[in-house]
Image (tube, rainbow, N blue to C red):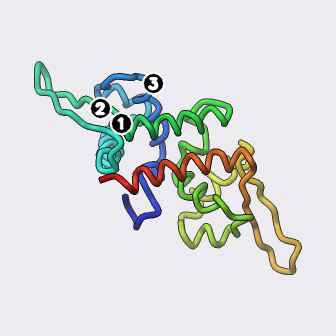
């Protein structure tokens, strides 16, 4: 995990799509075959290394006949993949364009979980990456996971709250976070 205990590999862009690709393969996948999800080799390797550190995947280097890296889900990774798959089916569309596959979706969902609403400036205090945050929040609103409201008070305050569908997805991501945090 990075940046304290709040962020995990699922806080990275395309992490959900990588986990789903491994889950759907149901057998070890050669790393280069995952470049359809993340086409930059160094970024792909960094994500997979982070997933290995979080106990989600196992990377196995094979030297015969040519060097290759096989990637497979651990038992915990399979449980996490099942939860990601569930969240994926709740939201219509292809995983590559969904909010749960965007950067910072995971911590935003967990931050909103269990609260009546969270003010946008409080989200920015935890994740000071304005462009990424506004993009993922807009996508979540479009998908029906969050509701954006502006307060009627004298100062402008933007509030976000989870919809019932958003709570289901946030609960899945909270469970994933707990599984990653409790790894050995």
Q: Which mark is residue 153?
A: none
Contact? badges 2 and 1 (CB < 8 Å): no
Q: Where does label 2 land, which residue?
A: 71
Dot 3 crowding, Cα within 10 Å, few <14, some 14–19, many 20+: few
The residue at the point 11 percent across, 19 percent down is: 65
The residue at the point 30 percent across, 30 percent down is: 31
Give above or below for 87 relative to 116: above
Q: In 3D space, how far apart are the residues under numbered discs 3 and 1 (Cα atoms)?
A: 14 Å
Q: Mark 2 or mark 3, which has the lower sequence index?
A: 3
Residue, far left = 64
Q: Which mark is residue 24?
A: 3
* Callout 2: SS: strand
Between 107 and 136, the one nearer to me in the picture? 107
Q: On the picture, is 145 further left or further right than 156?
A: left
Q: In 3D space, how far apart are the residues under numbered discs 2 and 3 (Cα atoms)?
A: 13 Å
Provide residue 177's location: percent of width, then percent of height. 47, 53
Give the quarter of the image for residue 148.
bottom right
Contact? badges 3 and 1 (CB < 8 Å): no
* Callout 3: SS: helix
* Callout 1: SS: helix
Provide residue 115's location: percent of width, then percent of height. 69, 64
Between 43 and 49, the one nearer to me in the picture? 49
Q: Mark 3 or mark 1, which has the lower sequence index?
A: 3
Give above or below for 55 relative to 120: above
Provide residue 130's location: percent of width, then percent of height. 59, 64
Provide residue 18's location: percent of width, then percent of height. 43, 35
Q: Where does label 1 land, which residue?
A: 75
The residue at the point 40 percent across, 22 percent down is: 25
For the N terminus, the image quarter is: bottom left
- Of discs 2 and 1, which sits in the foreground? 1
């Amino acid at each position: 995990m990075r940046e304290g205990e709040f962020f995990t590999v699922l806080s990275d862009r395309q992490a959900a799509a990588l986990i789903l690709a491994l889950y759907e393969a149901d057998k070890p996948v050669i790393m280069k075959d995952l470049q359809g999800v993340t086409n930059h080799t160094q970024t792909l390797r960094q994500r997979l290394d982070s997933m290995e550190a979080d106990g989600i995947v196992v990377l196995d280097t094979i030297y015969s006949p040519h060097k290759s890296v096989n990637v497979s889900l651990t038992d915990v990774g399979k449980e996490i993949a099942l939860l990601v798959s569930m969240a994926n089916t709740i939201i219509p569309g292809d995983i590559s364009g969904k909010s749960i596959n965007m950067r910072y979706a995971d911590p935003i969902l967990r931050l909103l979980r269990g609260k009546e609403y969270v003010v946008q400036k409080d989200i920015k205090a935890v994740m000071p990456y304005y462009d990424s945050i506004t993009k993922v929040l807009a996508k979540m609103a479009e998908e029906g996971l969050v509701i954006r409201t502006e307060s009627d008070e004298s100062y402008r305050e933007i509030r976000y709250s989870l919809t019932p569908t958003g709570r289901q997805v946030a609960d899945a991501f909270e469970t994933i976070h707990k599984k990653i945090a409790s790894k050995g």
